[in-house]
Amino acid sequence: MLWVVVAVLVVLWLLGFVVVHVTGFFIHILLILAVLAAIFALFDRSRA
């Protein structure tokens, strides 16, 4: 489930950064959230 969230956040970041040419700081928050969700998913899998 978290991998879907990661994929959606990365796609939204790519669309905002490449297609719409948004270069503000807030668009990079999507990428940061995607990385944090991926790290959380990796640690969550190792605990299971």
Image (cartoon, rainbow, N blue to C red):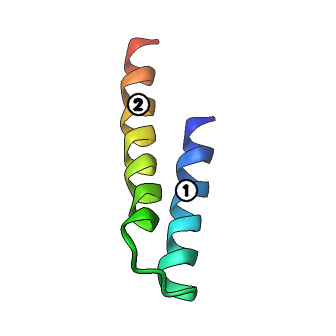
Task: Check disc 1 and report its element: helix, strand or loop.
Answer: helix
Query: Where does the image place residue 17, in percent across and percent down from the top left?
Result: 47, 79
Q: Which mark is residue 48?
A: none
Query: Where does the image place residue 43, in percent across and percent down from the top left?
Result: 36, 25
Between 26 and 19, the one nearer to me in the picture = 26
Q: Is residue 18 above or below residue 2?
A: below
Residue ID at (48%, 81%): 22
Instruction: Place residue 38 in its image quadrant.
Output: top left
Which residue was labeled with disc 2? Answer: 40
Task: Check disc 2 and report its element: helix, strand or loop.
Answer: helix
Lower sequence index among marks 1 and 2: 1
Q: Is residue 23 above or below residue 5?
A: below
Between 42 and 25, the one nearer to me in the picture = 25
Residue ID at (51%, 61%): 10
Q: Is residue 47 left or right of residue 22?
A: left
Instruction: Place residue 19 in its image quadrant.
Output: bottom right
Q: CA distance from mark 1 to mark 2?
A: 14 Å
Query: Where does the image place residue 20, in percent across and percent down from the top left?
Result: 57, 86
Between 47 and 28, the one nearer to me in the picture = 28
Instruction: Judge the density around disc 2: few (<14), some (14-19), many (≥20) Cα neighbours within 10 Å.
Output: few
Q: Is residue 4 above or below residue 20?
A: above
Which residue was labeled with disc 1? Answer: 9
Query: Where does the image place residue 41, in percent across and percent down from the top left?
Result: 45, 32
Which amino acid type is shown beneath numbered disc 2?
A: Phe
Q: Is residue 18 above or below residue 45?
A: below
Image quadrant occupied by the N terminus: top right
